[in-house]
Each structure stands twice: as structure tokens, then as C-alpha cells.
Image: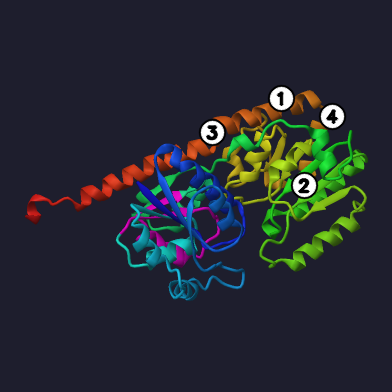
Amino acid sequence: MTVFWLDLVSELGGAQHSMIEVCSALPSVGVEVVAAVPYGPLFDRLTAAGLKVFPVSPIRATKRGWGLFTTTAKLLRSPSTVSQIIRTVKPDIIHANSLPAFLAASHAGSSIPVIWHVRDLHLPTLVAREAAKKATRIIAASEAIDEYLVDILSPRVLGRIRIVRNGIDTSRFGPADKAAARERFGLPQNVPVIGMISHLVPWKRHDAFIEAAAAIQQQRPDAHFVMVGRDLFKENKRWVSQLEAQIQQAGLSACFHWIKDLDASAEILPAFDLFLHPAQQEPFGRVLCEAMAANVPVIAAESGGPVNIIVQRVSGILVRNGDPQLMAAESLALLADPAGAAKLAQGGRARVLGQFTTRHVCVQLENEYRALLAEVQVKELPHDDDE
């Protein structure tokens, strides 16, 4: 079985990291993977994993508007079009890693089954409804996304939705040398270090992290704070400036570390004593799984994907509305109770190892692929009334 994975983003966001790990591991369950992505970090990582990768033109919906039909037409005029790749590869299934990728695949004029992998909680409703009508199967990356799709899509297509939770390559994460990690990033030893990792988009609520940091610092002046992330697509310069001003106004400059050029979270997670994730309406929460796998206690907003990742006070702590003052209070309580924090961290790691691994994702996808091919084959068989 050959599956053709398509993405139109060149940079490494959560969806792209998930694509790399899953596509690299699918051959272990008997699925051959061929990919098509734009030149850039994603292309390089897939190629380094030993996959056959075709280049396509980058297309991305910006905050100025989706413009998907115009950009899809641009893609199909490029030298290496999706339709040409499909004719060359002759895959059994096309797996589109985003809505733009699905639109490009569905306009390629192929009769091959196309899967639309949904990883977002905010989609242009009319475009999403039209896409769902054409999708052979729809993969929701979390229960939160499934609930969102049920709300916006026609009841006629809901039977095509399958939930396949994201997972991570847990071999990259685990208990590690805290002192070495702190030395590598210039962080102080023997003080509390609290972190957040996320691309710089407003809905991730870095401002709430900074507010929580200010509240924690009042009670624990020895604490340091690390924010890892950058403006990936250069669309949020004003937001970045606001955060810089907020850090200064909160009097945190001396204890606040902003690391903007790191893609591998596994390198810095061991340096943290706590991990905060205040984002609301998070589609899944991949970075939460990474922190939990790294044996770091996590505190997250009780919203979206984290609700299904964290078992309250067993594998992490959920805070209603992601309230920064409540997150600060929970952080201070864990810092004052090292044994309780360690138990929570152990519960988080066990939760990820049991439920959110790349292996789990690959087994589920392989089952979905085979079921989909069997379904298509049955539809293609001649019936008595056709003879």
C-alpha cells in the first residue's frame, strides 16, 4: 500500500512535526509513504528520514484571508504539480495534511481516495463544508476537533469522520540531565525554572504566561521564566512588540529568558521544573505531550485538546479559562511540594506513553487506510443490477 502525503507549508509547525514523525514510522506497519511539500525545513527533514519527497509550491492561508482557490490554481500551474506527482506515484490513497493541501489534491482530477486531516479549530466554514463533501475520509486530530467539525459540517458527512489523536516520538523525550540543559541555554542552576513553548500567535496567550510569571515572581523572587517561540510566518510583529513591553513593565527583564531560534523542544524541556500552557481553544496540544513525556509537570488551560490529554491532578493540572492568576497559584503550590510535583510528572509521562505515541497513530492510520481501500473496492465491484 502506497500513501501520498501532501502539505503546502515549508516551515515546521505542530502539524508538520506530526507529519514527519508519522510518515517516518508508517513503513514499520507496512505502509509505503511518498510525500510532496515545498522546499524548506519540512522538505529537508522528510528527506533526511529516508522518504521520497517531491517539491511543490508553498501555499499558506494568511490572516489577511484564505484566498485558497487562487493559490490552489497557482499550485497547479507550478512545474511540479500535484496532479503530475499523483500520475507518477500512482498511490492507493492521498493524505492531505491541511485544508489547503486537501483543496489542491481534490482539484488534481484524480479518482484516488483523498483523506483530509483536520488539525485546526478555526476554519472558513463555507470552504470546510465544501471540502468535507469531497473528502473520502476526514481525520480529526483530537476529540475537540471532532466536536468542532460536528458543529460546522453537514450531518450527511459526519459518518466519514474518524478521530486519530496526535502522538509524539517518545524516544526523543524522557528524564534527562537538568543541570546540563540549563547550562546549554544559559539558565541559572538551583532555582525554579518555569517554561512555555509555542509559536508567537496571539491565541497561544503568551501574555497570560507573562502575567502568571509576574504573580509567581512576587512569591518566589528566585524563579526564572523561559518562553520559547518565534513569529514563524512574520505575521505578528505587533504582538511580539506588545509582549516585549509587557515583560519590561512587569519588572521581569532580569529573570525572563526568551529563546526565539529553537525548533527541538526536547533540548530545553529537561531544564524546566514546570510547564505552563495557557492557550485556549488549542486543537490538540502536542507540546503538552512532549513536556509530559519529558517528565515535566504541566499546567494548562481547561480548553480544547488538553482536556482529553490531561487527567486532572493525575497527569497534569487543568485551570478553568486558563486564568493566569490561578495558573500562578497552582505553580506556587507545586513548587512548594516537590514530591507532589514529581508524582504529577510521573503520571503525565505514563499517560503519554500509554495513549499518545507515534506508534499509536500509525497503527490507527494503517487500520483506517485498509478499511478505506476495502470500502472503495466494494463500491467498485459490479452488482447484479449492473450486469
Residue that appears at 65% across and 51% down: 280
The type of residue carrying mark 1 is Lys
Q: Secondary structure at mark 1?
A: helix
The percent coordinates of residue 60 (x first, y second) are 56, 67
Report the label total.
4
**Residue 304 numbered mark, or none:** none
Mark 3, residue position:
355
Looking at marks 1 and 2 on the same chain, the residue that comes earlier in the sequence is marked by 2
Mark 4, residue position:
336
Residues packed near mark 4 inside 10 Å, few (<14), some (14 to 19) or many (20 plus):
few
Which segment did they paint magenta? 112-139
Q: Secondary structure at mark 2?
A: helix
Q: Quadrant of residue 200?
A: bottom right
Farthest left residue in view: 387
**Residue 343 numbered mark, or none:** 1
The type of residue carrying mark 3 is Gln
